[in-house]
């Protein structure tokens, strides 16, 4: 969505926050950052390109990383960021972080954060704070979300083009929400309420009503699907549409030429 480094770091930041104890798709998950071994495990699961120095993970670094996690969690919880408090917190993390320009893998140049020291926690702080800063200055902090699943407080980073991500990857949050939305629609359909009954038939959970009417959870009709094809969202879909249009134009051109020459129609060979 953004540049690869920022995307990769935002995913790592979300994973870091999700090591906090809490509910993941209706299952309790304990704190997963209580030992140095767990910190190393978290680091080992990172993309190799992220280059966070796992070799200097020790007790002191662990407690600094946990502090970082708590601050990032607070910033994430405040998103979309509209007040000063989360920005102030972000500025605390950015204190001492420098900037340098270096060669990127595509041959161009890119700005890269320079951490306050080579300590693991400082390197992680510089990297994560810079990535979040990216979202803040581009007014994209609404991409820092909490899973919409029932009994789930996992956080997610939405890196989709059309900002469509609603659920985490921990369990079956998306599935359960679809089933719930479907049932809520069925129930609403069965008891089309008279104004007098309206209060009695309201779903017990206000969230169910939201989910039932959330357009992103309602399966698209054939007409909507057709409209989506006309309005491609992904790069490959755009390319495919252009290709189809070009083929159609070429075909039309050939036909026009043929009818212009008034040539006799032979059998078409395929
Ligand atoms: Zn979830």
Image (cartoon, helix red, strand yellow):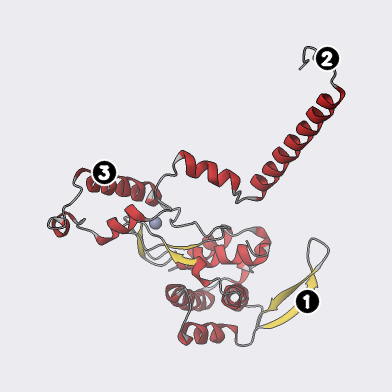
Residue behind mark 1: 101
Label annotation for residue 186:
3
- Give the label, 2 or 3, closer to the camera: 2
Q: CA distance from mark 1 to mark 2?
A: 67 Å
Name the residue that disc number 2 marks.
Answer: 264
Frontmost residue, 212 versus 177:
212
In terms of sequence position, does the residue under pointer 2 or pointer 3 come before the other?
Answer: 3
Numbered disc 1: secondary structure? strand
Q: Nearer the viewer, mark 1 or mark 2?
A: 2
Q: Is residue 198 left or right of residue 241?
A: left
Give the mark nearest the N terminus, 1 or 2.
Answer: 1
- Where is residue 4 shown, x and y percent of the image? 67, 62
Q: Quadrant of residue 33?
A: bottom left
CA distance separating discs 1 and 3: 57 Å
Let me know if residue 25 appears in the view.
no
Q: Residues within 10 Å of mark 2 (few under 14, many from 20)?
A: few
Residue 54 horizontal/vertical position (percent): 61, 67
- Within 10 angstroms of label 1, few (less than 14), some, or many (20 or more) residues? few
Note whether 62 is above or below 241 in the view shown.
below
Secondary structure, mark 3, is helix
> Residue at 79% of width from left, 73% of height from top?
102
Q: Is residue 36 above or below residue 235?
A: below
Please indicate, yes or no, whether residue 216 appears anywhere in the rendered image.
yes
């Amino acid at each position: 969505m953004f540049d690869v480094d920022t995307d990769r770091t935002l995913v790592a930041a979300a994973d870091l926050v999700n090591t906090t104890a809490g509910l993941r798709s209706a299952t309790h998950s304990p704190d997963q950052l209580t030992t140095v071994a767990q910190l190393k495990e978290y680091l080992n699961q990172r993309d190799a390109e992220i280059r966070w120095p796992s070799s200097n993970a020790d007790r002191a670094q662990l407690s600094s990383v946990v502090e970082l996690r708590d601050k990032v969690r607070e910033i994430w919880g405040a998103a979309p960021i509209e007040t000063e408090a989360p920005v102030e917190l972000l500025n605390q993390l950015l204190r001492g972080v420098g900037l340098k320009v270096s060669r990127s893998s595509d041959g161009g140049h890119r700005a890269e954060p320079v951490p306050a020291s080579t300590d693991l926690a400082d390197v992680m702080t510089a990297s994560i704070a810079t990535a979040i800063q990216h979202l803040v200055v581009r007014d994209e902090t609404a991409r820092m979300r909490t899973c919409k699943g029932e009994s789930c407080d996992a956080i997610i980073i939405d890196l989709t083009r059309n900002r469509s991500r609603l659920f985490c990857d921990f369990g079956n949050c998306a599935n359960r929400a679809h089933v719930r939305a479907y049932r809520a629609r069925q129930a609403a359909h069965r008891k089309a309420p008279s104004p007098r009954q309206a209060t009695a038939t309201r779903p017990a959970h206000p969230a169910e009503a939201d989910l039932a009417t959330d357009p992103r959870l309602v399966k698209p009709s054939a007409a909507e699907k057709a409209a989506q094809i006309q309005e491609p969202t992904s790069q490959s879909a755009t390319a495919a549409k252009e290709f189809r249009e070009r083929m159609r134009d070429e075909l039309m051109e050939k036909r026009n030429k043929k009818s212009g020459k008034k040539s006799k129609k032979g059998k078409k060979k395929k």
